[in-house]
Amino acid sequence: MQESTVTVKGQTTLPRDVRAALGLSSGDRVRYVILDGEVRILKARSVKELRGVLARADQRPVSLDQMDEAIGSAASERAKPGA
C-alpha cells in the first residue's frame, strides 16, 4: 500500500509506483472520483485520446447529420400522444 503526507496547503506527492501505474509524467493532469467515501485517482485524458473508444467492429461510423436525424426522430416519437 502506498501513502504520502498532506501538506498545510493540502498538497501531496503521488508516490513513484502510483505515477508509474497510471502512466503519469510531469505536467499530466489527474481526476479524482469520490465513490462511497473512497477516492479514485485517474489519469485525465483529452477528448482526442477518446476517439474510437466506443467503436465496435460490427458498427459503421455515422455522420453528425445522421445523429441529428436519429435524435429528431426519437424526439418526434416521444412527443406523440400515447408514446
Image (cartoon, rainbow, N blue to C red):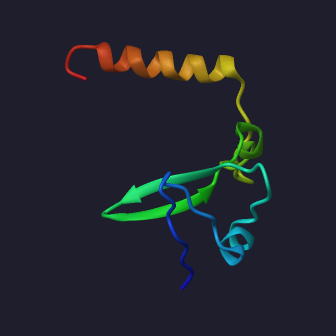
Query: Which quadrant: the N terminus?
Result: bottom right
At horizontal 65% and vertical 73% (from top left) the residue drawn is: 15
* Residue 55 higher or lower than 77, as above or below: below
Query: Which quadrant: the C terminus?
Result: top left
Question: In the displayed structure, does residue 49 sit left or right of residue 82?
Answer: right
At horizontal 58% and vertical 17% (from top left) the residue drawn is: 68
Q: Nearer the viewer, residue 6 or 28?
A: 6
At horizontal 61% and vertical 24% (from top left) the residue drawn is: 67
Residue 64 image offset from top left, x and y in percent: 68, 21
Counting every numbered tag in the picture gives 0
Q: Residue furthest front?
A: 8
Question: In the displayed structure, does residue 39 sit left or right of residue 14?
Answer: left
- Write down the quadrant of residue 49 in the picture: top right
Residue 7 image offset from top left, x and y in percent: 51, 60
Q: Which residue lies furthest to the bottom in this view?
A: 1
At horizontal 57% and vertical 81% (from top left) the residue drawn is: 2
Q: Which of 21 and 75 is in front in this view?
A: 21
Question: In the displayed structure, does residue 81 sit left or right of residue 44?
Answer: left
Residue 17 image offset from top left, x and y in percent: 70, 78
* Residue 57 higher or lower than 83, as above or below: below
- Write down the quadrant of residue 48 in the picture: top right
Q: Which of 8 and 70 is in front in this view?
A: 8
Q: Which of 41 and 14 is in front in this view?
A: 14
